[in-house]
Amino acid sequence: MLMGRVFSRPEKFRVYPPLIVKEMDKIGLQSVGIVSLLVLFMGAVVAIQTASNIESGWIPRWTIGYTTRQSIILEFSSTVVCLIISGKVGSNIASEIGTMRISDQIDALDIMGINSASYLILPKIIAAVFIIPFLVLLAMFVGVAGGASIAILSGNVSFSDFEYGAQYDFRIWDVAYSVIKTLFFAFIMTSVSSYHGYNTHGGALEVGQSSTRAVVYSIVIILVADFLLTQLLLL
């Protein structure tokens, strides 16, 4: 029912572009640092773990590059990054809208004849669905680069072997698969967090509880969606 109000025809279209740009900055650009740091070390850990488990001479060293690339592209860059973003962005969205609810700002918008659900939530959803896939693409590059740097500097694999493994059997569908998942995850984290914030009642304590519920529900639903989308897209 809430999403029905969110996607109903807005009163003034020209109001939304500035709001969307503002949300893109809050959701996307302000998350570049944490996302880059996360996937940098994630790629490094995957490379080190793969190298430590390759002791048999039957397994070529370029497997390090191949495993790092597949792990980062298929799962870490989309699911894990979106889980981290949902914790950061989801709690912020729920607390922001929840504070507006308990301070009667949302009621004031409704009294003025403004569709408060669309005005407050729609820009967040559009911004997240647009900007988070770019974060995921950035995460793919940084994660593989981090794995390559650590594996090469530690002497576990040569640059040529890692490069060969990273290019071996590369399919553009793997990247598309992660981006498609990200679109669903972005919608889930913003809509679920907005729902809990919009339906907050009480005081400051309830705002904190709504933020916690928003993050927990977002994570659970993202994991379920990840399973279902993997079944549909890869099998």
Image: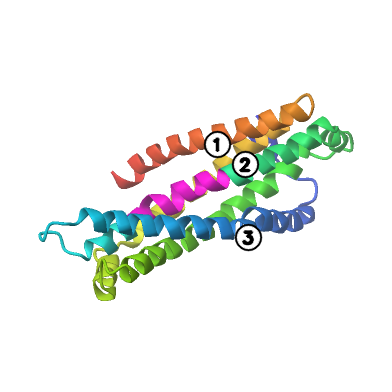
What is the number of the mark on residue 29? 3
Q: Which label number is shown at residue 90?
A: 2
Considering every residue shown, the one lying at the far top of the view is 202
Residue 54 quadrant: bottom left
- Magenta residue span: 70-86
Point out the residue furthest to the bottom here. Answer: 160
Q: Is residue 172 visible to the viewer in this orientation of the structure? A: yes
- Marks 1 and 3, how far apart at CA: 21 Å
Seen at 33% across and 60% down, the residue is 69
Mark 2 residue type: Gly
Residue at x-position 68% and y-position 37%: 94
Q: Quadrant of the N terminus?
A: top right
Judge from the rendering whether residue 85 lies leftward or rightward of residue 234; answer left or right. Answer: right
Q: Tag 2: Cα neighbours inside 10 Å, few (<14), some, or many (≥20)?
A: many
Q: Dot 3, crowdedness within 10 Å: few (<14), some or many (≥20)? A: few
Please report whichever mark, 2 or 1, sits nearer to the chain's N-terminal start.
2
Looking at the image, residue 70 sits to the left or right of residue 90; the answer is left
Q: Nearer the viewer, residue 87 or 106?
A: 87
